[in-house]
Amino acid sequence: MLPRVLRVSRKVEVDTVIKKGKFYQGVLLGLRLFKASGVKSPKIAIVVSKKIISKAVLRNTAKRRVREIMRSVIPTQNDQGWWALVFIRRDISGVSNQEVQRDLEFLLKKALLAK
């Protein structure tokens, strides 16, 4: 589990990311990122729709997998503060962790390098 300081948890934060953030789309994941001023560390939330994965156990497993991948990716990408919502766009139960990590790193590089 991600530490509390790295989680987008309040409704105000989620609403801000949805309204003001920019959306980036990958093959497996989507990323809505808001570059927040005055924030020292990145904050993340992971979202899975019931339309994508209908069973709660599989949704939680998918979120856990992405969360663990985020833990390995975040330390290399923490030069500025940002809030992000990671959307799982399709069932990733049959996909390797390397593919998910590659997609996530691609999205983060694309989002953090954009103006």
Image: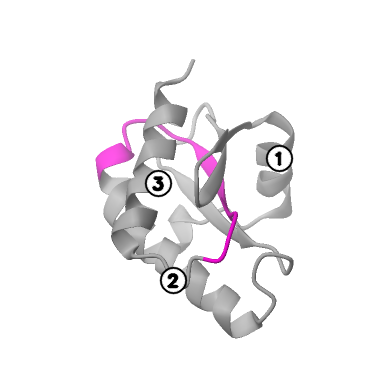
Q: Residue at x 51, y 56 (%)?
A: 7
| Residue with the mark numbered 2 | 94
Disc 1 to disc 3: CB gap under 8 Å: no
Residue at which label 1 appears? 18
Q: As drawn, is 82 to the left or to the right of 9?
A: left
Q: Amino acid at mark 3?
A: Asp
- Residue 1 position, x and y percent, is 42, 71
| Mark 1 / mark 3, whichever is N-terminal | 1
Q: Earlier in the sequence, mark 2 or mark 3?
A: 2
Q: CA distance from mark 2 to mark 3?
A: 15 Å
Residue in the picture at 52% in, 26% down: 37
The alpha-carbon separation of the residues under discs 1 and 2 comes to 29 Å
Looking at the image, which residue is at 42% across and 63% down? 67
Give the percent coordinates (x, y) of residue 47: 62, 59
Count residues near mark 1 (Cα–Cα under 10 Å), then give few for <14, some for 14-19, many for 20+: some
Which residue in the structure is indicated by mark 3? Answer: 103
Q: Position of residue 103 (x, y in %)?
A: 40, 46
